[in-house]
Amino acid sequence: MPSREIHNDIHPVPLIAPVAARTDNTAIVSAIIDTLGFQACELVLVTGTNTDTNATFAVLVEDGDASNLSDATAVADDYLIGTEALAAFTFADDVECRKIGYKGSKRYVRMTVTPSGNDAGNIFLSGVALLGKPSSTPTSTL
């Protein structure tokens, strides 16, 4: 049973908002996450029931200093906790979570999930970024 709280030490931010089923191979680009005021960032994906029988989903994490990520570059593996390969998933990974941590020095970060083989089904995907180790607490509840 949990005996410690993390409520005041994390700040969830929408990463990929839930939408109606996606039915093609269009890349799913997340919101840009501003890490200012936080020393930790975890990107979490949540899959729904995916009905395609051969789709795969690759993950790419990018970072940069421009608020619109016009300077985005792929994050080097040394600045990730876990791997993009482990955060990826297939059609068989229904109602599961995947996570990857970011420990780079750039202020902004985003994730792109690229489907392939989604030719006969629906993709359900959402995500949240958990910002932690704030410079001040408690964190906002918004």
Image (spheres, grey):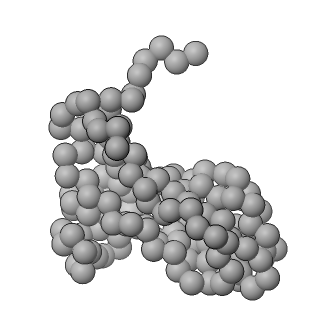
Q: Look at 25% across and 75% down and name the residue there.
A: 68
Where on the picture, by quarter, is residue 46?
A: bottom right
In this rendering, does residue 59 appear at all?
yes
Q: Look at 35% across and 70% down and name the residue there.
A: 62
Horizontal arrangement in the rendering, residue 42 relative to residue 39 (left or right): right
Across and down, in percent, residue 6 comes to 39, 28
Across and down, in percent, residue 140 comes to 29, 38
Where on the picture, by quarter, is residue 126?
A: bottom right
Q: Look at 67% across and 72% down and name the residue there.
A: 21
Total residue callouts: 0
Where 3 falls versus 122 (above or below)?
Answer: above
Where 133 falls versus 118 (above or below)?
Answer: above
Across and down, in percent, residue 133 comes to 27, 37
Where 50 falls versus 6 (above or below)?
Answer: below
Horizontal arrangement in the rendering, residue 89 relative to residue 35 (left or right): right
Where 39 falls versus 86 (above or below)?
Answer: above
